[in-house]
Image (cartoon, helix red, strand yellow):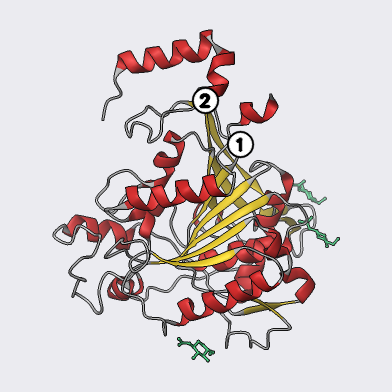
Amino acid sequence: MIPNIHTLTLLLATTLTTPTLAATNHPPKPFHPSKPILLRQSGGFTIGGRVIPHPTIPNITLSCDHGYIEYFTPWRPRRTSIVMWHSSSTQTFQNRWDGGEGFKDKFLRRDYPVYLWDGPRVGRANWACAPTSYAPDYRDQGNFVAWNFGPRWPEWWDDVQFPTESEEAWHQATSGRYQEFDSEASVELETDAAVVAADSGRLGEEIVYLTNSASGLRAQMTAVKSNTTNIKGIVCYESFGYVFPDTAGVAPGPGLNPFGPIVVPEEEFKKLAKVRSIQFLFGDHREESFIYLNQSRQAAEWINSYGGNAEVILLGKEKGLKGTTHIAFADLDNDKVAELLDEYLEENRLHHYAEDEEK
Ligand SMILES: *[C@@H]1O[C@H](CO)[C@@H](O)[C@H](O)[C@H]1NC(C)=O
Ligand SMILES: *[C@@H]1O[C@H](CO)[C@@H](O)[C@H](O)[C@H]1NC(C)=O
Ligand SMILES: *[C@@H]1O[C@H](CO)[C@@H](O)[C@H](O)[C@H]1NC(C)=O
């Protein structure tokens, strides 16, 4: 869609000539969905990781196991940054399933600074300090079920929020991904870099993590490792994995422990209770017996028992968003999912403009 030139000029003129008025002049609510995205800047950087010497030639090195951030700063930013942490593809935040607008643009339009994070070894941060491997495992049809598109391939849920008639949409969904590295060791490695980023202030001094699937577990672990109070919110769309205190009597997951539970000392766990608000959201067609829904209820209880503020939300049953998938922010009705996030940000006082705070 081409932004209306007249509106754009007017907006720029207002910003440039009446800075004092602009501070109190919030965009109307609900703001116009085609309000132009005005950026002050965008860019990217690596953060965290290590520089290791060659095993036998000590004067040559490798910089590795860092994370990569791409950032977008609105012209007139709100104070809180939204850090979008995908499970295995930033693409899920960039576009809706049908190619329509994703959460990245939706929240830039709302003037939130947006950060797209690739954890160590994943995506654009794939210089690893150790060998990694990729073995094709023919998982397209497995994705269909894991992402809650239907009970089994190729049976879509009747009400699924996906353009089921579009083969191209399905191909985009299943191919726009990269190697995810699911293991507890990988969670440790990725969160070591993520916490350096969070604590540095370079993602902003107020962060809300938006996560999906395995990145929900990673964001919880980052909060557990953080030494600052920069992490104000964690919003998990279908987190596959939860963190528990060692007092909970919960056993760590088996084997390489790809999806938790991860057990941490009680004192560290209490940091999750200091996060202003944590939401565990689930798509439609999930039973209470679904292991990650069950664990989310237990994890929320533990967080709240230490004075925290965690809740579990069923997007289908409780919010009327029928047919929501594993990746609700890419769903056809992602406008409604975004409105729920607006409410969360407002209720938790994370919606203020940076310039309002300075007054
Ligand atoms: C490393 O040291 C060797 C031996 O002194 C030297 O020949 C080589 O040029 C050095 N390499 C770099 C990249 O400095
Ligand atoms: C946080 O503090 C602990 C204990 O002092 C320290 O070991 C850790 O490296 C710190 N984390 C960061 C990201 O600075
Ligand atoms: C959730 O898990 C706990 C512990 O494994 C179990 O006792 C409980 O019955 C489960 N709840 C549901 C609704 O499946």
Label 2 element class:
loop
In this rendering, is residue 1 above or below 336?
A: above
In the picture as drawn, the residue positioned furthest to the left comes out as: 165
Q: Residues within 10 Å of mark 1 (few under 14, many from 20)?
A: many
Which residue bears the numbered disc 1? 79
- Total label count? 2
The x and y percentages for residue 73 are 54, 32
Q: Given the image, on which type of amino acid does mark 2 rest?
A: Trp
Question: In front: 275, or 117?
Answer: 275
The x and y percentages for residue 149 are 27, 69
Question: In front: 201, or 316?
Answer: 316
Q: Disc 2, disc 1: CB below 8 Å? A: no
The x and y percentages for residue 18 are 54, 10
Residue 75 badge: 2
Q: Is residue 64 left or right of residue 270?
A: left
Q: Can you tell which quarter of the image residue 139 is in?
A: bottom left
The x and y percentages for residue 239 are 49, 68
In this rendering, is residue 359 above or below 50?
A: above
Q: Quadrant of the N terminus?
A: top left
Q: Can you tell which quarter of the image residue 242 is in?
A: bottom right
Q: Can see residue 259?
A: no
Residue 59 badge: none
Q: Given the image, on which type of amino acid does mark 1 rest?
A: Arg
